[in-house]
Image: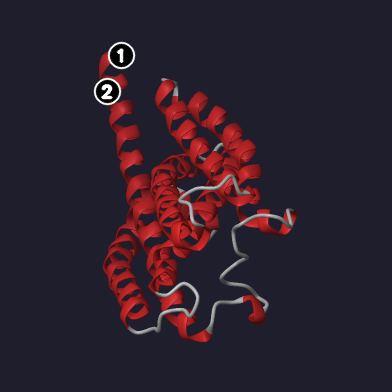
Amino acid sequence: MSFWEYANPRKYMEWSSPVMMWCFGAAPALLIAGVAWGYFGTPNAARFEASVKIIYLHVPSALMAINTWAMMVVASIIWLVRRHHVSALAAKAAAPVGIMMTLIALITGAIWGAPMWGTYWAWDPRLTSFLILFLFYLGYVALWAAIEDPDTAADLTSVLCLVGSIFALLSRYAVNFWNQGLHQGASLSLDAEKNVADVYYLPLLCAIAGFVLLFIAMVLLGTRTEIRLRRMRALTLRERKA
């Protein structure tokens, strides 16, 4: 069976329902476990005291904000190349989730920045590119809402998504591109020496897993909703013509 058969709207509705329900069940458990474990089960950092524990919200949300846009880029390319409607609807459904993740990352970053830098905001390269990414998310959603024809909206938002990928890339690697900047390096890395200390590592992975499953569940739900809305629109147009 071809992979693309699972993206057929009818088959998508069949397999996505149990996966979505499983993710919605597991995500809160992992999120609560990760955040509670990290906050109550790990020591305060010598330099930053309890403020370091905001990483259990900040790091997963920032990671998902960037990767949500990456998922939208892939879905947009599939739409532009194959004209596959479910991919365009999945990208559309992911955008509000990306807005939520980016907003959480910006707010928790500001809270964390106050004790670390002495200010809630600084025009640091990574922070600035992250703010621009947030504005691209808003523009993406607004563009979908502003265009009546769904295929035209999918075309234009896909192009916007590809352009915005530059700022998603900068948000991820700004610390590497510019030596100066207040923002620390990556908390998770393939290089073990750059990771957070082991005592914070496992609860952080647990929290990230919770955010990932929450993202999957919400995108599946949003895509299912968009498919139903498109079916209702098609039926309405058919009745009008009749």
Residue depicted at 30% across the width and 58% down the height: 17
Q: Residues within 10 Å of mark 1 (few under 14, many from 20)?
A: few
Left or right: 36 with respect to 194?
Answer: left
Please tell me which residue lies in front, 101 or 149: 101
Identify which amino acid the numbered label 1 is placed on: Lys
Q: Which mark is residue 236?
A: 2
Q: Secondary structure at mark 2?
A: helix
- The disc, 1 or 2, on the residue closer to the chain's N-terminal end is 2
- Quarter of the image with the C terminus is top left
Left or right: 177 with respect to 70?
Answer: right
Which residue is outermost to the front? 118
Q: Position of residue 149 (x, y in %)?
A: 44, 21
Q: Position of residue 123 (x, y in %)?
A: 58, 44
Left or right: 113 with respect to 129?
Answer: left
Identify which amino acid the numbered label 2 is placed on: Thr
Residue depicted at 64% across the width and 48% down the height: 125
State whether residue 79 is above or below residue 103: above
Q: Residues within 10 Å of mark 2 (few under 14, many from 20)?
A: few
Q: CA distance from mark 1 to mark 2?
A: 9 Å
Please indicate, yes or no, whether residue 242 appears anywhere in the rendered image: no
Q: Choose top left, top right, bottom left or bottom right for residue 29.
A: bottom left
Q: Which mark is residue 117?
A: none
Q: Position of residue 143 (x, y in %)?
A: 47, 27
Please indicate, yes or no, whether residue 198 appears anywhere in the rendered image: yes
State whether residue 59 is above or below residue 104: below
Q: Which mark is residue 241?
A: 1
Q: Secondary structure at mark 1?
A: helix
Which residue is outermost to the top? 241
Total labels: the figure holds 2
